[in-house]
Image (tube, coloured by chain):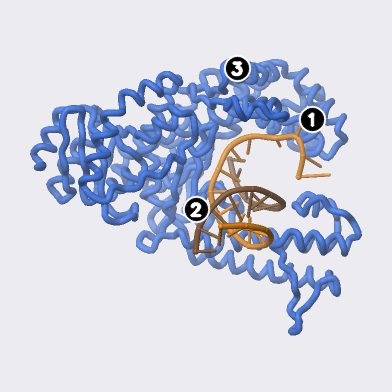
Chain colours: A blue, B brown, C orange
Amino acid sequence: MSPSSAAELLARRSLVALCPWASSGDLLDPPAGVALAALDGAALLTLDEPGRALLAAWTKRADRVFLFDEARPALRRLLRAGVDVARPACRATLEALAEGHGGQSESSQICAGPHDAAERAHKIVHRLEGLLARVDERGQKKVARLECLVLRAFAALESRGLPIDVDAWSRLIDEEKQKAGVAKEELLALAGPHVQRDLFGVPELNLDADHEVKVLLERVTGRRLLDVTRATLASLDHPMARALLLWRESNKLVTTYGDAFLSHVDRRTGRIHATFVPLGASTGRVASRDPNLQNLPSDARFHRCLKAPPGRALVTADYATCELRIVAELSKDPVFLRAFDEGQDLHSTVAATMFKAEVSKTKNPELRQRAKAINFGLVYGMGAAALAAQLDVPHDEGERLLQQYFRTFPRIKDALERSVETALQKGYAETVLGRRLFFDPETLKGPNARGELSRIAKNMPIQGTSADMTKLAMVRVHERLLDETKGSAGLVNTIHDELVVECDEADAERVAKAVEREMADAHRALLQRVPPEVEVHVGPHWMH
DNA sequence: TCCGACGGCCAC
DNA sequence: AAACGTGGCCGTCGGA
């Protein structure tokens, strides 16, 4: 088939399936060509210059939808060829929403050649109607629209990559190696003869082997241990436990964020091109891997290494107290709403209301701490035991606090219970956008199933609505920055309720305003009652 | 060489 | 730690 038949197809049809083929598995390499398919015809297009220009002219249009088998990797490849798809649709995404499971669809590899690509394009375009009907049956049409649109932003984000100062980062890791060594020496000195040494005096102790550590600590302290987690070790109040904790802290940084992490810095771009899985979590949250860019140490030393190149800047923007604002919106609790309307410190207000005392960050801070623990815990469907543990008070005190909380804020109790009711009656929990988490009837027959369902049903609408909001914000921010900066500015990371954008230094203030505005508008599109609060920082590096 | 389960721990 | 939600990565362990 000739380019002219591709041109004809693209002009004629507003929905076209598009499957790229490529010889390399590298997402930084552009595809060799694409297969196009509509219900009434098909064409192949090699991505040499005339083909590329033809395709790019059609894909950028808002009145043309391009259906992919797996959109995100395909969009990444196309971006490397200078082809941006404004309105992608994704078979795998729709499938996930129709099936009600997460996003790790059986990874359909890139097509090796035009034949495979043509076959796949034909297949998906003919299956689309049925697939959309199943999505609709599940009530996930609006969610599907957002999930498809946001793939463009994710592809661009992955393709752009996160900038990092590898040398500065490596120096931090070296420091941590040093600290880990010191901590281990300290620990060995404290252990003395309790640790065996081989012929050459090398201690036979593997601090990574929890069982060895447990045996050693039990011997030295004379106490029985249930486990060797941080909390247990801290409660021992023993110098050897403290040395072990210091070793763990540094060793964690060395193993997880050292060479293993830096191996993901791309040779060519010097940046990190992680994989983002938009439906990676059952709640609608995004997952990130290879590497995970959503659990980098919050330590400012590390954030300072995530640095824009010379002449460039990073804009960091996050939704302040996002989940508690969602709780306020869902419950319409007057105290919560008023606190947000008036810009009060919510934890202080909650503490003052439930304890009938004056509370601020400096006045009666222990009451504020209690309120804060409950505020966060309620988002997770926390029980009295967990609260008591968190606050280090007796169980009945935890019970009492929780009761007092729900007596003071009955609408919050009602809202949480409504979620559980819906889950039991309809079989799913739901976000503000209408994203649903369907409960598997099989797994709900276990003895602890009721409690688990209850916690998930309470948490999902909150966590999931936050995800709805951030994804909507990503779509808006991505489009706005394309319009305003012609692609010089763009997203480089997203962490649940935070966006990181890279731009020219000269544009930074304007970009910051645009990001703030789009995030606030995304909030308002979902939550009508509670006001948004977006915190924005501009700097040479990631600020949080 | 790979796999999965597990304990532990990083993030929100 | 815990009857506190969502993830991913590390190392060990036991097994193919």
Look at 40% across and 44% down and name the residue there. A107
Screen quadrant of the N terminus of chain A = top left
Residue that appears at 50% across and 42% down: A287
The one of A345 and A235 positioned closer to us in this rendering = A235
Of labels 3 and 1, earlier in sequence is 1
Circles 3 and 1: CB atoms closer than 8 Å: no
Q: Residues within 10 Å of mark 1 (few under 14, many from 20)?
A: many
Mark sitting on residue A384: 1
Q: Does label 3 or label 2 sit earlier along the sequence?
A: 2
Report in which chain the residue with disc 2 lies. Answer: A
Residue for badge 2: A291
Q: Residue at x 60, y 30 (%)?
A: A323
Q: Amino acid at mark 2?
A: Pro
Dot 3 and dot 1 within a common chain:
yes
Residue A77's place in the image compared with A213, above or below, is above
- Could you say which quadrant of the image residue A381 lies in? top right
Please identify, in this view, whether the residue under mark 3 or under mark 1 is nearer the observer.
Answer: 3
- In this picture, is A354 found above or below A159? above
Q: Which residue is mark 3?
A: A422
| Residue A186 spot, x, y in % from top left | 78, 70
Depth order, front residue of A288/A16: A16
* Residue in the image at 30% along x and 37% along y: A68
Measured Cα–Cα span from mark 2 to mark 1 = 36 Å
The amino acid type, in three-letter code, at marker 3 is Thr
Q: Position of residue A120 (x, y in %)?
A: 27, 39
